[in-house]
Image (cartoon, grey):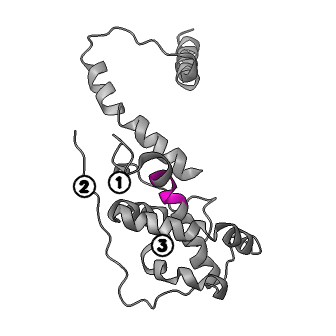
Amino acid sequence: MKVALRDVLLEDLSTLERTQRAAETGAKKHMILQDHEVLVRHNYHVIERLLAAAAA
Amino acid sequence: MNEQPVVIVPARAGCPEAVLPDAFAALQPFVSVWALPTETERNIRRHQAPMADIVAFSDAMLTQVDAIVAYLNGFDVNALPPEAATLMQLLLSLAEVAPVIEFYRQPSVVDGYDPRRFTADETFVMRPSL
């Protein structure tokens, strides 16, 4: 189980640095997150909530 | 890409070869190669071993895997006798090479991230004491 999970992560991580480099060019102003990326979406949701609470 | 090469860890010199429980003595030829105590060592071995050796190890293990699991289930995983611990390490190496056989048909993840840059935590609290 752990080996299978790690190998899948190695597949996903292979795009990470390329995605980051592309994002840092600023060519795209936003990124659409599909429904399966709920953890990433929730992360941004919580960050926004904390920032809003701090600003209030 | 800033990929780093796979680091090959040399075999531990001076250690007598571990032995298996009598019922699994037929697997003894694989002990020196595949009975490794850490995930990192097993992963390095997977990437170091020729494909034919991985297939031979997997084929040999799969003929006895049900008996191996049944045997190991008789012990506390954190208090395995030395012979059973060696057998457990072989079983974990079988898990390590399972994606090689079943998914990738090659040792490494196809177009994957360098596994040496994704370091295993060998001190994790749920890790069995092997």
**Secondary structure, magenta segment, majority class:** helix
Query: Label 1 amino acid?
Result: Arg
Q: Quadrant of residue B5?
A: bottom left
Residue B15 location (% of width, % of height): 42, 89
- Residue occupying the point 31% across, 32% down: A17
- Residue occupying the point 74% across, 75% down: B75
Residue, disc 2: B5
Query: Label 2 amino acid?
Result: Pro
- Residue occupying the point 60% across, 62% down: B127
Residue, disc 1: B116
Query: Label 3 amino acid?
Result: Leu
Residue B126 location (% of width, % of height): 64, 59
Do the residues bearing badges 1 and 3 touch, measured as CB atoms within 8 Å? no
Q: Secondary structure at mark 1?
A: helix
Q: Is residue B23 above or below residue A37?
A: below
- Residue occupying the point 41% across, 13% down: A31
Q: Secondary structure at mark 2?
A: loop
Q: Which residues are magenta?
A: B95-100
Which quadrant of the rendered structure holds the N terminus of chain B? top left
Residues marked 1 and 3, same chain: yes
Crowd class of label 2 (few under 14; some 14 to 19; many from 20; radius 10 Å): few
Residue, disc 3: B36
The subunit letter for the residue under badge 1 reads B
